[in-house]
Structures are given as C-alpha cells and as structure tokens.
Image (cartoon, coloured by chain):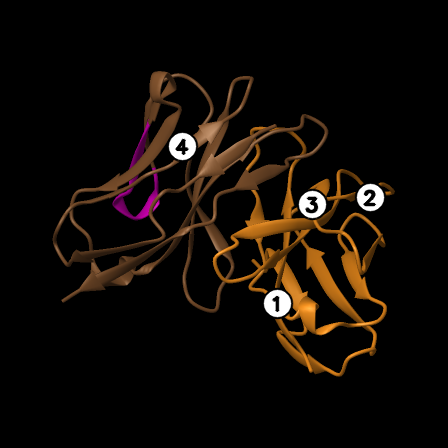
Amino acid sequence: NAGVTQTPKFQVLKTGQSMTLQCAQDMNHNSMYWYRQDPGMGLRLIYYSASEGTTDKGEVPNGYNVSRLNKREFSLRLESAAPSQTSVYFCASSQQGTNQPQHFGDGTRLSIL
Amino acid sequence: AQSVTQPDIHITVSEGASLELRCNYSYGATPYLFWYVQSPGQGLQLLLKYFSGDTLVQGIKGFEAEFKRSQSSFNLRKPSVHWSDAAEYFCAVGYNTNAGKSTFGDGTTLTVKP
C-alpha cells in the first residue's frame, strides 16, 4: 500500500539548474498538492490540482511550474533553481471536498548551492 | 480568509505526563478541522478530524481533540505521553469546496523527557 510516492528523496543542485520533482498516488484521489516546508513557517502551498486537467496557484508559486500528467501523477518543476528554493518539498493528495484529509509523501529534501 | 494559529512553537513534557497542544482557527463558515503529526524525516500523518456532531473526537495513537466553537479552538490532548510521541504537530482547517485544500498552522514541536 504505497500511498503517495515522491522521487527523489534528496537532491543537490547548483544555482540555475533545472529539476523536476515527481509525485504519484495510488489512492484514486482527484486532488493533488505541492507544499514547501521551511523551519518555523509550516507548510506553504505552491500549486494544487483539484482534478485531472486543472492546476492552480497556491500561496508561493513564483519560480515553479507544475504538470498534472494524469490522475495519478503531479510533477513540480524548478526551471532555474535559486538558493531561496532550498527546502523540503511535500506532495499530498486527497479526495475533493473541504472535509477531506490529505495524504502526504515522505518529502524531497532539496538543497541549492 | 481562513487562518490557523498554534501559539506554542515548542513544548516539552515528561513521559507519562498529560499533553495539550493549542490550536485556534479563523474561518467564516463551518470549519473542518484536522490534526496531523510529522515524525522526523517523514511526511504528515492524519491523527484525527472534526466535521460535525460530537465536539470531542478520538484519533489514532490515543489522541483526542475538542472543538469549541465559542473559543474558535481545536486543542489536541493526550492523557499520558510516550517517548514515541516526540514529533511535530500541525493543526489545519479545510476550505474550498472544489478541492480538499487546507490551511496549516506553523506547527508545535513536542519534546518528551524521560
């Protein structure tokens, strides 16, 4: 029972490099999310996808792009990485609806030098 | 706009002692409230949720939370803390009917003393 799977788990980039973080869920959830977690700042929503074929900006979308490839997969791309994007990135999924809890992956720890 | 405040950044309790983590929310409609736990190096795991009905909800790992509308609070409690409860705890309020979006508090880190 995999749940939400994120790859890679760790990555080090140089400033200006690009990278795509992958996320897949096997729970048949409609909604998927990308968050970043920084010390003392909780979770901040980068982008979300309410359903297959739709994506919307969250609280901190600048410097990121997303693709909802199909119902299972939701990727996050950094086109030109900056040190300020050093963070732990979490993917989550849920059924649609305000009362639905989210299910999280184990995160990608990204360092940008 | 909705918001969640967790007033305590860090709490330390002795093993076997009781625990209460505070959460206050701001939301104009009926709130859907959640508590999540995050162990080091892992993602968040749902502890419990409140939607309606009984204001005292039971969760996993012996946790419970009480919804108090008059105080806009949803505090998490455990009668006797175990060393394995050391983790970071997040309160969240669900909003937006088009997606299961939630706003998260900044978290409370729990340290358990032997």
In the image, residue A109 lies at what x, y percent?
60, 72
To which residue does mark 1 refer? Answer: A87
In front of the other: label 2 or label 3?
3
Q: Is residue B64 a member of the stretch shown in magenta?
A: yes
Dot 3 falls on which chain?
A
Q: Is residue A37 above or below residue A110?
A: above
Q: Are marks 3 and 4 in contact (CB under 8 Å)?
A: no
Look at the image and give the residue range highlighted in magenta: B59-66
Colour in which the image shows chain B: brown
Task: Kindly identify which numbered label has been placed on residue B82.
Answer: none
Element type where label 4 sits in the image: strand
> Is A100 displayed left or right of A8 in the figure?
left
In the image, residue B57 lies at what x, y percent?
33, 29
Task: Kindly identify which numbered label has been placed on residue B24.
Answer: 4
Query: Image point 17% across, 64% down: which residue?
Result: B113
Marks 2 and 1, Cα distance to the nearest angstrom? Answer: 22 Å
Neighbour tally class for label 1: few under 14, some 14-19, many 20 plus, Cα within 10 Å: some
Task: Work out whether mark 1 precedes mark 3 in sequence or the reverse, and give the earlier one.
Answer: 3
Query: Image point 81% across, 64% down: which residue?
Result: A77
Task: Work out whether mark 2 precedes mark 1 in sequence or the reverse, and give the earlier one.
Answer: 2
Task: Kindly identify which numbered label has been placed on residue A59.
Answer: 3
Specify the quadrant of the image occupied by residue B54. Answer: top left
Task: Kindly identify which numbered label has been placed on residue A55.
Answer: 2
Q: Amino acid at mark 1?
A: Ser
Which of the two residues, A3 or B3, is positioned nearer the viewer here?
B3
> Is B66 displayed left or right of A21 in the figure?
left
Colour in which the image shows chain A: orange
Q: Amino acid at mark 3?
A: Glu
Element type where label 3 sits in the image: loop
Dot 1 falls on which chain?
A
